[in-house]
Image (spheres, rainbow, N blue to C red):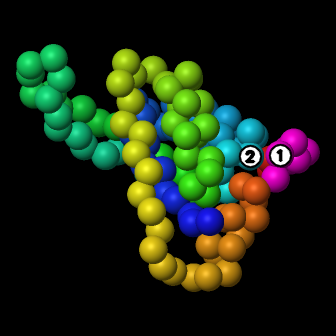
Amino acid sequence: MSAQFVYITCKDNDEAEKIGRELLENHLVACVNIMDGMRSMYWWEGEIHRDTETVLIAKTRQARVEAVVEKVKQIHSYECPCVVSLSVVGGNAEYLEWVLNETGFEGRKTELV
């Protein structure tokens, strides 16, 4: 069982917080990081666009990635949101174990502070 980082771009900080909270409340992820103010340039419908976006990085386990992608697609404002999974190949073993532990339970009571 391996840990995964799911990289998600959002239109703004509010959307990133909404998505992050939903993923946490459903125990699909152990943690999210939100980084506001990213500048993006990309092709869309035959034109180059330039926007400011917010990055959301969610930490989860491999078995939850598909559910994370589906949940994000349900609530994201973009027609085709960037939601990609990156395998974690090393790091602090205790931290990675925590990620796996936090995402390995169904139906846990949610207590966000």
* Residue 110: image location, x then y, percent: 85, 44
In the image, is 4 to the left or to the right of 18?
left
Q: Which residue is drawn at 76% across and 65% down?
A: 101
Q: Which residue is the site of mark 1?
A: 106
Check disc 2 and report its element: helix, strand or loop.
loop
Q: Residue at x 14, y 29 (%)?
A: 43
Check the image and report above or below for 107 versus 87: above
Decide: few, some or many residues near mark 2? Use Cα within 10 Å; few <14, some 14-19, many ≥20: many
Q: Give the range drawn in magenta.
A: 105-111
**Residue type at numbered disc 1:** Glu
Q: Which residue of the protein is positioned furthest toward the left in this rendering?
A: 47
Q: Nearer the viewer, mark 1 or mark 2?
A: 1
The residue depicted at 75 percent of the width and 40 percent of the height is 25
Give the position of the N terminus as an image quadrant.
bottom right
Mark 1: which secondary structure? loop
Q: In this view, does 23 lie to the left or right of 105?
A: left
Task: Say whether marks 1 and 2 touch (CB < 8 Å).
Answer: yes
Quarter occupied by residue 22? top right
Residue of label 2: 27
Circle number at residue 17: none
Q: Where is residue 19 in the image (x, y as percent from the top left)?
A: 58, 35
